Image: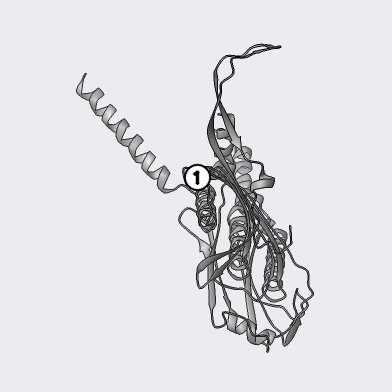
Amino acid sequence: MIPKVIKLFIVAAVCMGVMAPSGWSGNKRIMTIRAAKVMAERAIVESIYGLKLKATEEVKDMIPASFEGSTETKTQAKIKGISYDDIVYDQEKDIAKVTASVALDTITNIDGKVMNLKNKVYKRVGFATSTPEMAGPIRALRAAELDAYKQLIKQIVGFTLESQTKVENYMLKSDLVKTKVLATLYLAEVTDYGWDKQNDAFVKMSLKVSEISEILGESIVDGGQVIEVEGQGAQEDDFSAVKKTEKKQ
Amino acid sequence: MSKGTKNSIQWMIFVVVISICFSSLSRAGNRAMVEQNTKELDEINKKAVGEISDLPKDGTVKIKANAKYKEGIIQFNIYDKKVSDTEEKEIKLEKSSELNTGSVKEETLYINNSNEPKNREKQENDPKGN
């Protein structure tokens, strides 16, 4: 038979175990929501003020294991009047979602051009977590976002291609292919985002060329066009594992 | 082989097949994205190199180009192009005379004759004047 004192101790321990997570969530919840607000603010700045993006891709002998790719973005601006419309916190996963919106009359963008926004409301969503184990889906979403920005720039501004190709009997055998992207982008809008069945993230972005032309007060070639892209981002780095295995072999 | 052993082997094969099918279906990660990107880069390069009119039969082509999409179609402005062709030529040396270094018999040398880039390089439309 278990003594009464031990029984009471077990009951108390179980109660503490059940009650504790909800008791701790106070600070964590606030911190996670605050972080999501910052993410949403950054997204708003990237959308309206714009961002500078630098990306490179390189592949040797058409072998995926030789692929090297990197994307960097930079932005810095002061925007007043951002409001947070929708704040959702998932206590179980410790993930917060915040929708930020702003309406501005005019703004000087990253290229120093004054844009007449006519108080149009711009909305962007930000996700964050304080638990590193839960950061996978959020990281994948950010990767998808950067991929979408890069694709938009490739479509609008273009990119530089450098290659050294071997030709044998008039047949092309790619040896080294490099692409470079360096440009600024603004007024990109997120039309959809989410995660697929494999937990890979996607972000759909669009850019209305005619609207930008009107906002900037400049005529842009290929006006009237709507450019739509879909960026992808993965949670798991299964590529590095394959790369390591192939290097060992 | 007993009926029980046969059944258990069949079950094992079934489980292995199912798990392989599911693992390939639920494969997530950046590997597929990288593979797709590699394929795209190769296609873009093939298209750009394909626009060069004087492709050698065997050789190396170095290009630098600005690529831009127009109405969904990629267009290249090749501003730097270097083409060097490599041909295998048979050179016959017929020397039977005695030299100070010793006698040289009839030989067949196969020389991989790669032309000097300075003579053969072709640079067109270089906006930078390189």
Comparing A8 with B26, the one in front is: B26
Residue at the top extreme of this rendering: B102
Query: Which residue is disc 1 drawn over?
Result: B57
Secondary element at tag 1: loop
Q: Can you see residue A2?
A: no
Comparing A82 with A18, the one in front is: A82
Residue at the left extreme of this rendering: B3
Comparing A152 with A223, the one in front is: A223
Q: How many marks?
A: 1
The quadrant of the image that shows the N terminus of chain A is top right
Residue A201: % across, % down: 54, 59
Residue A2: % across, % down: 56, 34
Residue A58 vertical placement versus A55 (above, below)? above
Within-10-Å neighbours for mark 1: few <14, some 14–19, many 20+? some
Residue A236: % across, % down: 56, 47
Comparing A89 with A38, the one in front is: A38
For image coordinates 54% across by 74% down, the residue present is A227
Question: Which quarter of the figure has residue A130?
Answer: bottom right
* Rendered image coloring scheme: one colour
The quadrant of the image that shows the C terminus of chain A is top right
Query: Is A87 situated left or right of A78 in this image?
Result: left
* Amino acid type shown at disc 1: Lys
For image coordinates 28% across by 28% down, the residue present is B8
Residue A108 vertical placement versus A94 (above, below)? below
- Name the subunit of mark 1: B
Residue A222: % across, % down: 56, 79
Question: Which quarter of the figure has residue A191?
Answer: bottom right
For image coordinates 53% across by 67% down, the residue present is A229
Q: Can you see residue B23?
A: yes
